[in-house]
Image (tube, helix red, strand yellow):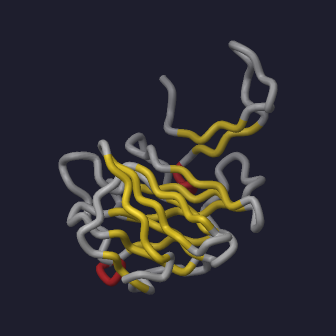
Amino acid sequence: MVHPQIAAFARLAGENTPPVRTLEGQKTKISRSMHGFGYDAIHDEIVVTSPLAQAILIFRGGANGEEPPVRVIQGPHTQMLGGPTGSLDMVSVDPVHDEIYLPNARNDLLVFDRTANGDVAPKRILNGVRGSSIAVDTVRDLLVVGGGRASSIFDRTAS
């Protein structure tokens, strides 16, 4: 039986190549329903959504084994709200401006401080935004939210 895990493979790994390292076990708080991942190359952190727990888990980039997250954003003040259609299954990181972006079931885009930990409120909320992808243009200070057949472009600091 395969247990929930995050596996890291060598860049040039081929078929049936075992992972270089894995994050797994109870202390990691990883569950089977996790699909949203982001990587912060500047701060070497892995950002993962946990829809069932309505949480964001942040791990060291080199985490291995049963290593717990370095930070967990979770609780009623976060305003994270899952839904029956797979919400909280995507996350994006802006390491330049130290922000984490998370869409929720109310079609809101929650923006958290990258270093947030615990039951914290979003630093801002962009209401009525529905999308399946989020990208930040750090040069032009724009936020691009794509979904379906359209993309919306906002000032990065819009709320």
What residue appears at the point 46 percent right and 61 percent down from the top-left corner? 144
Judge left or right: residue 149 versus residue 12.
left
What residue appears at the point 40 percent right and 84 percent down from the top-left corner? 124
Tag count: 0
108 vs 18: above or below? below
Quadrant occupied by the C terminus: bottom left
Judge left or right: residue 47 versus residue 64.
left
Name the spot of residue 154 as percent of width and height, x first.
Answer: 43, 71
What residue appears at the point 58 percent right and 59 percent down from the top-left corner? 47
Q: Quadrant of residue 9?
A: top right
129 vs 39: above or below? below
What residue appears at the point 54 percent right and 50 percent down from the top-left corner? 37
Judge left or right: residue 31 versus residue 85.
right
Q: Quadrant of residue 23?
A: top right
Name the spot of residue 146 as percent of width and height, x first.
Answer: 39, 52
| Pick the front one: 78 or 3 | 78
Name the spot of residue 138 as percent of width and height, x first.
Answer: 64, 70
| Pick the front one: 53 or 10 | 10
| Pick the front one: 117 or 126 | 126
Name the spot of residue 24 as percent of width and height, x first.
Answer: 59, 44
